[in-house]
Every structure is written in structure tokens, then in C-alpha cells.
Image (cartoon, helix red, strand yellow):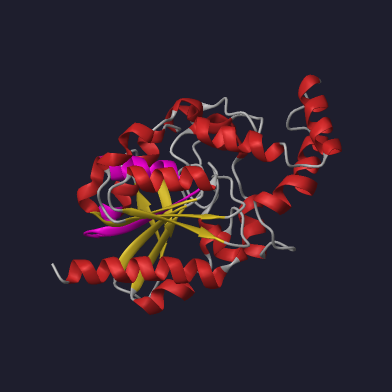
Amino acid sequence: MERKITLKSSHQLYTKTSPLGTIPIILIHGGPGGTHEFFRSFESFLAPLGFKVIVYDQLDSYYSDQPNDPSLWTIERFTEEIEEIRQQLNLDRIYLLGYSWGVVLAIEYALKYQHNLAGLILNGLAASGLSWQNHMQKLRTTLPPHAQELLTKLETENNVGSAKWNECLKTYFYPRYFCQLSPMPIWCAQAMANLNGRVCLHFCGPNDFIVTGTLKDWNRWGDLAAITVPTLIVIGDNDLCSISDAQKMAERMPNSTASIIPNASHMPFEENQGQYFAVLGTFLTSTKTQQDSL
């Protein structure tokens, strides 16, 4: 069921809830400025397990209102969107899955509203902007030498984000570390086409390998121990989050585990669906069983 909800700010957000399932799980899309379209596969896997899949577009994303007001582009306000959705959809305790940039919001939500969570899934990003930048820099060194040289030349010429820059990433970086499927599933390609680049630039900056936007100062490594709800950290084995960072997150969170999906990069839910949803389904059903027994 599709529904627009009205925020306290009077702006409207697009939401969609699966017709089947009773246990709510809200999925937070990436970007920043991305869309819910990345999550098309989730309903077919999770609804048969009894989970009500809820997706939404954040403010200034394609299907929601787009006031284009940078004063609204704060981590705190995007976090509050999740709580407003939970309340307006009359949900009690929820599972929450953050994907990519959505990991930032999922961590922030858990730190503020942990009492509303039955479980937490963090998919594809580490606990600080600097950690993401460091791993991106490392991945850059694995590109063919001529691609590395071109990126450096374009940086020197102040041509970051140019057609040549984007073509280099499209040719050498994204097929290895963002989505290894060729062609990319059409709904994921559509999500990429609908990305709001202004929001992405605000939080990340123009250079894919250097965080100069708002996220450069975001760091929650020291706060992870406060998140005690059952938590799954899941990444692909060639993801934009390093395996060591995923494992370190699990070590710092007292009720968590890390799972590395083989033969996958930043979209393991498409690249290796069988293993990804087996891991996710096991986590969700096992934590549900634990809570039912309380």
C-alpha cells in the first residue's frame, strides 16, 4: 500500500507497505538522496517469513516532497523522519535496516530511540565518515594504473565530477565495488537515475574518495557500545565498507554479529540474493523467536 505521510514540518514523504506480513521492518535507503527503489527484492523474501516490509523516500528524494532547502539536510532531521513514520503508521516496535547512507540514520535512530527497536541491520557502511573515506582510498589503489593516473590528473585540474571522472568510475570502480551484475537490475539503475545529487554533494562532497561534506565529521565508533538491541552488520566481500570495519563494529556492539556475503560488493541483496537473504532471514526469525519467548 502506497501512502504519503505529512511530517511535522508539513512536508510529505512517500511510503509503501507490503500487503503481507505483520512484523514491521523499515528499510532506509542510501544516497544520500537515493530512493526506495533499491529495495524491490526485499518484499518477496521477507513477507513470506511474516515481516511487513516498509520502504520510504527521504525528504528531497524522488518520490517525496523536494523543497530543496539545505537547512533541512541534517542528520538529526533525517533521523527524526524515521520516528515520524513509525508513529504515523501506528507501529510499535520495529526492525530497522539501514543501507549505505541509511546506516548513518539507523545508528542515530538506535542511539536515540532504541526502546522502539526489535532489531537493527546495518548494511554497507562503517561507523564514521573517515572510515568510509579511508577504505575508498584503499580501493582506489586497486584500480588499473592508468585509471588511477587519470583520476589524479583530473583532481589536479580541478575536474572532479567531470564527464571523464564519471566515465572512469563507471568503467573501473562501480562494476567492481558498487554492483558486480551486468547489466545492473533495472530498478537499481532507475534508483541511480533518480538520485538527488544536490543532497549527496551536501553530505559527501564532489570527490568520491574524499569526504568533504557534512559526513566528514560524523563518527559514532565511541557510541556503538550503547546499542544493545540484536544487531546484524552485513556487507559484501568487495563492499564500500571494509571487512575489518564491519568486524570491529560487531566487536563494539554487545549483541551483534557481522556477516560477509561472498561474491558481492555494495549491493549484496542483488548480487548474491540467496546467501544475503538466508543470513538476513535467519537473523530476523531468530530474534523474533527470542522475543516471543520473553
Q: Residue at x 66, y 30 (%)?
A: 207
Q: Return the residue found at the far right.
A: 146
Q: Give the position of the N terminus as an image quadrant.
A: bottom left
Q: Position of residue 5 (x, y in %)?
A: 36, 53
Q: Is residue 173 left or right of residue 29?
A: right
Is 106 included in the stretch rendered in magenta? yes
Q: Quadrant of the C terminus?
A: bottom left
The answer to whether residue 2 is visible is no
146 relative to 142 in the view: left or right:
right
Q: Residue furthest bottom?
A: 48
- Viewer-proximal residue, 205 or 58? 205
Name the residue nearer the viewer: 215 or 239: 239
User: With respect to residue 249, does 93 lie above or below?
Assistant: below
x%, y% of residue 136?
A: 62, 37
Residue at horizontal 49 percent and vertical 37 percent from the top? 67
The single residue placed furthest to the left in the displayed view is: 294
Residue 240 image point, x, y percent:
58, 45
Q: How many numbered circles are shown?
A: 0
- Which residue is at the front of the view, 204 or 80? 204
The residues colored magenta run 86-111
Residue 63 in magenta stretch? no
Image coordinates for residue 242, horizontal then vertical, percent? 55, 44
Whether residue 6 can be seen here: yes
Task: Give the quadrant of residue 286.
Answer: bottom left
Q: Quadrant of residue 10?
A: top left
